[in-house]
Amino acid sequence: MVYIKEFKKNIFPAYINPERNELFSSWYCRLAISHYVKPLTFIKNNFGHNAPIFGRDIDYLKPDYLVKFLLNHTPLSKKRIDKLFLTSYNDIYFNNYSNRKGHILSLGLNNRNRKRFGTMCCPKCLSSNPYYKKEWRLFSTIICMKCKSSLIDRCPNCQKPISYHLIYNSGNQSIPDLSFRFSLCWYCKMDLSTFELTQPTSLEIEYQNFINRTLNNGFNHYTNYSFSFINGLILLCRTARGTRKNKFNKNFTTILANEYNLHLSPIKEETGFWSLQERKETLPFIYKFIKDFAVDKGIPQHLNLTRSYLTIYKQDLDYWLISLLDL
């Protein structure tokens, strides 16, 4: 560390600022590389051998000791540090009564290895400035609106989860191979930024634009609270892909099939475990259903949606959803 008189504290000598909407774990890896140190070694140097920085979902947990360390050794304010973590979405994307595990994509951690596909990225964004954004961990995110581009949630070459903290972990040298870009696949070393994707559909763009505006504004014309809309959106996704033994699910999937020719297979797992492909199949059409249903509530009587069958997922239903569906 180097004492900086302006800040009156010891600062990282090769300090770099986080990028806009960057995840803590992404920034910390880049900070390590700026010091010519492997990320895992950098953790040991600062927090000791047993610190579970990459062994847990650190971007979701935001432990107090970590915040205190950053306050003491970076120029960042408490407010700026808080914005590095997924907890900064509290009262925007989720609240204290939300099921956060269903809102944030799971990494499926086993020690430092990721078994799930809970980190996404935009190849076009990585090609211009390689770092990983907070919104790429959200269930509701399926495309990049900045690039009007599709996302990926795994390496297209080897199908391994995106694990940027392991990119520089190979080799016996203590110094990382600086020829490696931060956009590489950790396993096969394919450059993820070079992968060309198909263009998003107009419905996907419309959906993502609406979600982004809702989160930026903190509300939309359905509800005064953005997290409330996300709660309802995810709840309808669960019913669209839930067991057909549930009467609400059965009637709802029949409506989707009749209106949009949409035939979705059931998914047993919690929404936080859904793949990008499964979410792309579901989210835009749930949004379209909400949009269309708000204008025309013409559901046949025999397909009536009953509130009691919906409470198996969530006891306290959001009022805007109850009002919308006349539950």
Image (cartoon, helix red, strand yellow):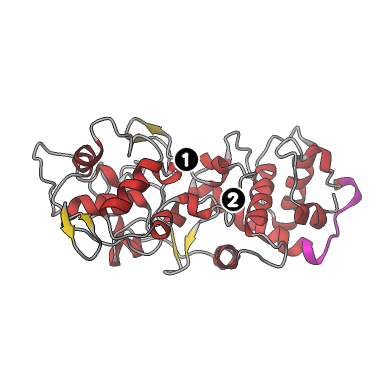
Q: Is residue 325 left or right of residue 16?
A: right
Q: Is residue 213 left or right of residue 108?
A: right
Q: How many marks?
A: 2
Check the image and report above or below for 82 versus 209: above
Task: Specify the segment rendered in magenta.
Answer: 293-302
From the top left corner, tell me how far across and down residue 168 is, in percent.
Answer: 19, 45
- Is label 1 in a helix, a strand or a loop? loop
Check the image and report above or below for 303 versus 214: above
Q: Can you name the residue that lies furthest to the right here?
A: 301
Q: Earlier in the sequence, mark 1 or mark 2?
A: 2
Is residue 12 visible to the viewer in this orientation of the structure? yes
Name the residue rendered at 42%, 69% in the picture: 147
Circle 2 packing at 10 Å, graded few (<14), some (14-19), many (20+), is many
Is residue 155 visible to the viewer in this orientation of the structure? no
From the top left corner, tell me how far across and down residue 188 is, in percent.
Answer: 24, 43
Q: Is residue 167 magenta?
A: no
- Is label 2 in a helix, a strand or a loop? loop
- Image quadrant where residue 74 sits: bottom left
Name the residue rendered at 29%, 65% in the picture: 129
What amino acid is at disc 2?
A: Phe
Q: Which mark is residue 94?
A: 2
Q: Can you name the residue that lies furthest to the left here?
A: 173
Q: Which mark is residue 106?
A: 1
